[in-house]
Amino acid sequence: MVETIDLGEPFDLKKTLECGQTFSWCKKREGRTSKYWTVRNDGVLVVWQEGDTLYYENYGKRIDPRTVLRLDDPLEDIYEQIDRDEFIHRSIVTNHGFRLVRDDFFPCLIAYITSAQMQIPRIRRIQRDLERKYGKPLRFGEKEYYRFPQPEELAKVTEEELRELGIGYRVSYLVKTSEMLRDGFVKEEEICEMDYTEAREEIKKLPGVGNKVADCVLLFSMDFLESFPVDTWVRKVVKNKYPDLYSKNYKKLSKNMRNYFGRYAGYAQEYLFYYARNCEEL
């Protein structure tokens, strides 16, 4: 059954799901309409947008689009707090309605562990390969989907098998991280209760998780909206547009930007990243 949400605040589905922040959504074209779908637990959510209306369908276990697409985030209030200079203002105006996502922890973690020195299409392909080969199949009518494997499922896979998917040297990180999560060495629910700094250090106990991966996972799956990941694009932005806040040291640069933009620094980071990558040469 198709359901609808009347969007009371700005929302741009295409930019939100195609900007590179998430690898848990897939896209399909039906005529002139772009539909996106994601699998969570034993459910599938399909969404598409027409003007100020979001359409969605659920199959299996129900998934609330308001939660996974952060439709309850007070975007206008967020704009007011992060709109502190001309550059971020241009990004907000150009990309009005772009939101952060709330992905499941484990697939988000694995995606960012494998992301080093990889292009976005390749990261997406690896995520789909992991789902099809090691995840649980879900069939609804004639359509078949695959849930991303759980830590205990991925922990059973050998490094040799994973290497066949083109993951390269990161295979040991995936296996060891899955084992540590399976065995409770690091617990998602405990990280969520920590403050930002403590949470970042806790998640960095996992193999293959450095500062950037930790910040991405905290931001895109764990509600730490102050997290400010620093990649090549963001580093260029800060160096060119915020030279007084720039530092070669990752932690110092990230802290400077968190202090500058405040509790919604993660939103500012994505707006800066998206604008620099798609709208303006630096």
Image: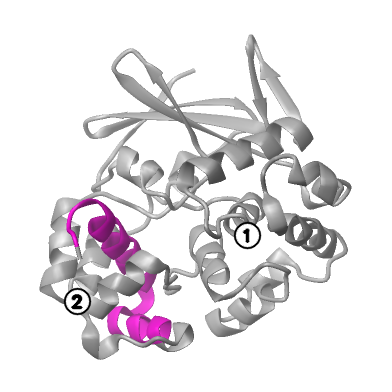
Q: Which residue is mark 2?
A: 241
Coordinates of residue 31 in the picture (x, y in percent): 33, 12
**Image position of 151 (left or right of 247):** right
Residue 29 lies, in percent from the top left, at: 39, 20
Side of 149 where 253 appears, left or right? left
Percent across and percent down for residue 165 are 70, 40
**Vertical comparison of 91 with 153: above or below:** below
Establish if 72 lies above or below 11: below
Disc on the earlier residue, 2 or 1:
1
Residue linked to disc 1? 113
Q: Is residue 201 positioned above or below 185 on the image?
A: below
Q: What residue is shown at x 24% (from left), y 51% (from top)?
A: 278
- Residue 147 seen: no
Q: Horizontal placement of 43 versus 74: left or right? A: right
Instruction: Report whether residue 111 is seen.
Output: yes
The region drawn magenta spans 253-281
Using the image, tell me which numbered label, if any, was put on residue 30: none
Residue shown at 74%/61% (left/top)? 173
Q: How many marks?
A: 2
